[in-house]
Image (tube, rainbow, N blue to C red):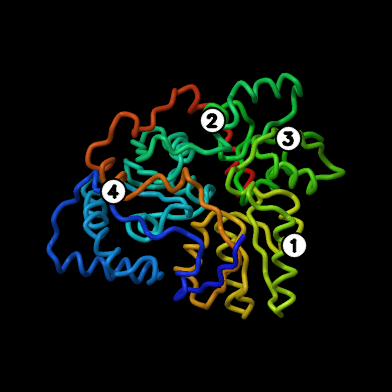
Amino acid sequence: MKAIPLNREAGKHMQMPTAPLPKGAVKPKIFPEEEIEEEAKRLFEAIGQSSRWNMRICRSISPLTLEINQLKKEKDVFLIAHSYQTPDIVYGVADSVSDSYTLSKAARDAPQETILFSSVRFMAETAKIVSPHKLVLHPSPDAGCSLSDGISAEDVIKLKKKYPGVPVACYINTTASVKAECDVCVTSSNYLRICERLPGDKVIFVPDRFMGKHIQKHLEGSKEVIIFDGECEVHAEFTGEKVISWKERMSSIGVDLQVLAHPECDAGVLEESDFVGSSELLMKEAMRLASVGSNNIMLITECGTAERVLAESEHEINLLGSCVMCRHMKRTQLEDILQALREPEPEQIIEIDEGIIHRARKSLSEMFRLAE
C-alpha cells in the first residue's frame, strides 16, 4: 500500500481515480448557463476536492444533477445513497447518505412513495422488504456484492438442518431470500450487540467469516459461533502485516498513526487497529480525532468513506495508506440514476415474492427490536 498523505485541499495525492466524466449515453435537459454555473459552484463546495473535482468537472455534471433533483420533486422520489457511492451522487443528488443500518431505517420511514437506491442490489432489496408498498428503483441491476453473491438460501437451510434450533444471524449484505431463512439481520454497527442478545449458547453467523471471527472472539466463553466461509472482496485486501508495517514506518518518523478499520476485515487487521466500526462510525471517529489534533489517520475500508471524511471534516486530516474501491458500488453513475428516474427498465424495478418479503421482514424487524 502506497503512502497518500492528504487533506481537504490536497486530495490529488489520494490513490483514487479521477472524477468520472459523464458517459454520454443519456443526454440531460438543457439548462440556462447561470443555473449550470450556480449548480457547479454548489457541487464544487460540497465535494471539497478541488484537484479531482474541479469546476470543469462540476460544470459537466451540473445538467445531470439539476435534472435529477428536478425529477425527484416532480415524481416524489426519495434518493438514498450508500457512503461508498461517488461524491457527485453523495453530494449532488442524494437525500440520505449513510451506512446500511441507517439507510434501512431511512427506507422504512421515508414518506415518499418511490425510493431510488443508489447502491448494490441487496440494499435496494432491503428497501423493498421494509417498504413493500413502495416503488423501489435500483439504477444498476448488475451491481452485486461478493458477500451477498457468495451465499444462497439453500446454504442457510443446510446449516439449519445441521444445527437444529440454533439461531441464525445474517449480515445485511445478503439477498432477500437469504434473509428470509434467518432469524435476525445485523449490520456492521450492531452485530456484536445483537449476537450477544440471541438466546442459547450457540449462534450461526453468515456470510462474512471475518466478522464471524470477530464475534467468536467477543463471545468467547459464552457462545459458540458457527461461521460461513464468505468475505468482502474489498476488505479482504487488507492484512494485519500491512497495518503493522505502516505503524512501524510512521512511528520511525515520529508520526502517531491512528488506524480505523471496518469489521469486515481480517482479525489480524482488527487486532492492530485503534478503532473498529461501521463506515459511519469510522467517519465520526476520524473527524473526532482530527478535532483533538490526532489527524494522521489510516482508514481501512472502501474509498467512499475517505471521500466523505475529506468533504465533511472541519479540521485538516492526513489520510495515510491506500483505500480499496468496491467495483460494484462504483458501477452507478449519474446517467444511470437519471435514466431510471425518467423511465425505469423492468430490471431496475425491485420485485420480490410476497412470501419472501414477509419472512425477510421478520429478520429485519428483529434487528430493529434488538438494536434499539
Horizontal arrangement in the rendering, residue 277 relative to residue 25 (left or right): right
- What residue sits 20% from the left and 69% below the top? 37
Q: Are marks 2 and 3 in contact (CB under 8 Å)?
A: no
Q: Tag 3's secondary structure? A: strand
- Type of amino acid under label 3: Ile
Q: Circle 2 sits on which residue?
A: 360
Q: Nearer the viewer, residue 62 or 280?
A: 62
State how far apart marks 1 and 3 are (Cα).
27 Å
- What residue sits 75% from the left and 69% below the top? 248
Q: Are marks 4 and 2 in contact (CB under 8 Å)?
A: no
Seen in the picture, residue 351 relative to 286 is either above or below; the reply is: above
- Pointer 4 or 3: first along the chain: 4
- How packed mark 3 is, by other alpha carbons closer than 10 Å (few <14, some 14-19, many 20 or more), is many
Q: Circle 3 sits on which residue?
A: 227
- Type of amino acid under label 2: Ala
Residue 16 seen in the figure: yes
Disc number at residue 23?
4
Horizontal arrangement in the rendering, residue 185 relative to residue 228 (left or right): left
